[in-house]
Amino acid sequence: MAVLRPLDKLPTLNSGVLLLVGSDEALQQKLAEAILQEKKDFNISIHLAASLPLPSERDHLRPRIDLVVFMIDIKSKYSLKNVEASLAHVDANFFLGKVCFLVTGVGRVNACSIETNAICQLGKAYCSPVLFCELELEGIRVATAQRLLRMLQICAGHIPGVSALSFVSLMRNSDDD
Amino acid sequence: MRPRRNSRTPKQPLQARHKSQTDLSAWRKGRRTDSEKSLQHHQSADDQKYDSQEGSLEQAFSYLGKVQGRVSLKKNSVLQKHLDAVESTALKQGLPPEGFEILLKAALSGRFADTVNTRLLKSLIPASVIPQDSVVSAVSLLCVGKCSGNIQVLFLKWLIAMFDFIDRKEHINALYGFFFFFLQDEKLCPYVCHVLYLLTRKENVKPFRIRQLLDLQAKMGMQSHLQALLSLYKLFCPEQVTITLPGKMKTYFKNSEGPWKAAITAVRQRNQGLSPLSQAAFLGTSQPQSRKRKWNAQLVIPASSSYTNHLEEVRGKNRLCLYGTKVSFPVEQLQTFPQLLQNIHRLEFPSQMGSVLTNPLLLHYMNCVKDESIYLRLYYWMGQMLQEECTWCVVDNPNEEEFKSFLESIYKAECFLQEGFSACEEFLYKTLPLWDGVCCRSEVLRLVSWIPPSNFSDIKSYLYDPLAQLFFTSSVYFKCSVLESLRQLLQNWLNCTVIQVDSDFSSSNTTLSGLVNVVAELVHFVGWISTAGLRLENNSTLLMYFILDFYGTVCDMYLKYNLPLLIMPPAGVFYPALLSMDSANLNQLCHIMYRYRTNLVAAKENELSKKSILQFKFSNQTYQEYNQYITAMVGCLWTSSAFQKDIHPQGLCMDDKLLCKTGVKELKNSFNIVYHPAMMGYAVQFLKEICPDDTTFNFKLIKGKKWDWYLEYLYSQGLKGLKVFIESSISRVSQASRSKAGNVET
Amino acid sequence: MAALALEPPAPAPTFEPPAPPLDPEPIPAPVPAPVWVQGSINDGDLNALALLRLRDRLKEQLVEYKAALLANQEYFTNHLKINIIEEKLIQSATKNLQKSIEEVKVSLQNKTLALQRVQITDALRNQVDHNDEDSRLILETMKQIGLLSQAVVEYQQQANHKEERMTDIKRKRLCLKVDEGQKVEQIQTTMDMQEEKPASVNVSETENNKLEQEKQMTAVIQNVFQNLIVGSGVNWAEDASLKAVVLRLENNVCVH
């Protein structure tokens, strides 16, 4: 299946599924490990992909994906292009709160080759929050893992009264004016 | 110059070093005797190694000082050897003060090839300080102009990077005109500007220099380094620098620390031990034994007696020969409060501002002097420090502890001055979106509390938005810390309205009505994140404490801070507090509602008697909301009628059918002071006390006279908020409603 | 089981990176803690609380699917091309709707909270009357909570008290700051006047002007000297007397 849809599978009981899309595999792996290290009260599975679409032959094995995190390396224009191309393979319904852009590499502002403004515009266009971080630093990696985990919990429907859509509208309250 | 062998100082214990401040060689001798007496065998290989290193260093100095004619490195193994010796010592432990003159002369004389000169300059790292005379000689050689342009630039960069470590600056300032001359050189210009920026005092600003600068600026266009210098000139002579300069810039100068960065950190760390003692002596107070930090680097150098003598001498001469300035008092000599008072009209601030932050006397001075140039320098210096040292923005900066204590000292200075620094504000605006909310959490959030009130759209997009994103995605503890810091922010804003101290503040077109709006926006923002936060955290009691704390300040804005503004908490905060399982929450809510009442009553009275100078009226909405809430509260806690009579659209008024479905008997009473989930414990204890034999708890017994006893019991348990609430909001109808309440019970 | 699976990149468009061989099998994750039973990790059975939590989650997910179904019945946005004006209209309508949804949500939550609290306290009250092990435990806990609350309230009062004093001090500090500023300004003006006084007493206006002119002239001459020395390319630091002169060239002239 070419397009990734949020609700065409039933959720697994008490679990959350995260899809990390980004071109830096090592960093992805590190972040995934940091997320798995966190204490949580539900099962979590993380899928890593360099880009979308995901291969359709394994689709039947894949659980429902609750949150897609697009990782953009601020130092690499390629990573942004990669993400932009991948976005085409995501169903519009995903952008009702189940997508997040994670900008990495802010610790090397001098080496940055993408304007943060461009990324913010991307976030605005796709109605999805943009988080900035530096995954090379362990402390920030852990903090980022915790933040993503909180979002995943909400996206997976684990917080009563808070839907993914309402959460993303909280996060994006700023862009309205 | 008498060579002093003091290169080992850094490794010595503190007391010894303190003693050695004025005469290192004497100390060294003393230590030797000591070790000879008791620790002879301890005169270890270590010592010998140092001695041999010192030996080769001395040889290198004498070689580099004497060698004549152009020497090429490739063919000369002797030069190679000495160069290696200098470099390795410099990197390991820094060079002794006497080495600088020799090496600077060697590097700038043009005797060696540029590769050698570069290596020499790069290894000019002080063990402790750099004598100013070595710099004077170097500038003299610069005038001779035998070295290449690249070396000249490198020298200036070195001078800027090492500026803090130069022991005295007055001779360097005397060379102001010489540096100024080098502005003409296009390649040197940016660096010369930076040096001049560090050196400039009011006396240096002369009409012909202003003209030259303006010409240069016209020729080269608006360059940031020229602009920085001009802005400083403009501060000193506003009537002569008539051009308009754009507002504050992010960075005026390129960072010159480059090649020496690691080394500078090392020197600062080496100098660290000096601080607590010298500082204590300096301030006349005993300071906690904190680590020495780089932002008070230059205060490490105590005014030596010889320096003082020298100064006196100079002054004496000045009197005789008509030369001299309006004699200024260098801060290095400022040690006591009386001194500050005596010299307050002629204090001269250090060129780099780091020392001000941690020095109470200088802070006192800043507190009362409205000198723009001080603020501009502080702004520049602090902005650069924050940007370069920020641990979450600069990956290669692993030293979180150091950055933390830097932020801490900024915060303390802000508290002392009762105002925020604009450099700090900009830093927060720039880096909050990149912050993870963990690194230096309490320090950053404390700094947030000193952000000055400014227009809403700025504060919203730079402060509220990033803060909200962090708030929603972080733990409950982070949420609490954010609320606490916003409460401090509110209090700081309110305090400065009570006393319109700041002339900046009133001039920056922040009128009272403007300020009311800014405060109102803050309160609304907190109301919004609180509602969402309670939902995300499942009505956490802890979070509620912090939310109610915030409203504890809000409810008193009119009476305590004279601000014609009262805003009620949103229903998403009020009802969860009213229905709380925790009696402290409920008690706090009662107290807040009592304060709201007092404020509203006072406002109404002022409005009626027209005594009020403030022509603002609270919106009817506030009164209306208050009345709705008070109805709900009385309905819950007292008359047991909330489910019917609550008139708030988001309140508890519910259909009887729905209520029946809960399957709870006598549901109406559920939130009165006996049955309320937060009060049940008290009711149980009370029943135990009045009927100790009865093991079943008959809550219905609490009515009539026992109701009064029960109230007394609650008050005796410390629920003062409940007391003032009931006495103020219920007492007028108390007799009637109490009997009614009693009836309802049965 | 927590799992970390690598998705092999699909045979795909233009700028696919040279893909390293990726492991198509899920990697066993390092933390396999089963979670829903965290309330009773030790014995491993599902307690009531965990079940309730699961029920809440299922409900929440159900609501999500319901909403999606409902939304998919209305096609209007999918097939229309929207121009800018309409987009703005939709945006403002969205904003209004968000606001009213939020209001309804708060209302619902308040009412639900009230009902839940009613039920839970009722259940507690009934349980307390049973006079068994559970009721003793509940009573003991209530007692503890009472003591803790009392302590909390006490500390809150102390904190309030201290805060009030702090505010007073802050205000006094601010007042002092204003006063200090004025005082220092006074000092400055007084000092300036004192400096001018002897001059104006002893020296006439013209003499004063002359002196001022001379001062400026001297400054210019000093500057010329500085430039001369630089221009000459002399290593002036080598000559002690020349150095002494150089180091005085920045001093302003004044009379004592």
Image: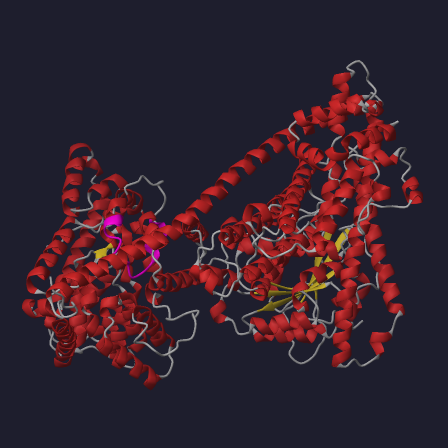
Q: From the viewer's perspective, tell me whether residue C124 is left or right of residue B371.
A: right
Indicate the position of residue B181 as horizontal and vertical percent values. Answer: 22, 78
Q: Nearer the viewer, residue B676 or A103?
A: B676
In the rendered structure, does residue B568 fall within the stretch colored magenta? no
Q: Residue at x 71, y 56 (%)?
A: A152
Residue at 72% from the left image edge and 72% from the top image edge: C10
Instruction: Identify the magenta region.
Output: B340-359
**Image height of B59 relative to C238, above or below:** above
Q: Is residue B109 left or right of residue B149?
A: left
Report whether residue C1 is seen.
no
Quadrant, the C terminus of chain B: top right
Tell me the residue at 85%/46% (across/down).
B653
Q: Position of residue B191 (x, y in %)?
A: 30, 73
Instruction: Please provide percent x and percent y for residue C163.
Output: 52, 40
Classify the position of the N terminus of chain B by image quarter: bottom left
* Vertical relation: B210 (above or below) B729: below
When the figure is inspected, residue B190 is found, relative to residue B337, above or below; the finding is: below
The answer to which quarter of the image holds residue A91 is bottom right
Residue B590 visible within the image: yes
State the residue at coordinates (85%, 56%).
C63
Depth check: give the residue in front, A113 or B335: B335
Q: Is residue B345 magenta?
A: yes
A102 w.r.t. B591: above or below: below
Please state if B148 lies on the left or on the right of C122 as rendered: left
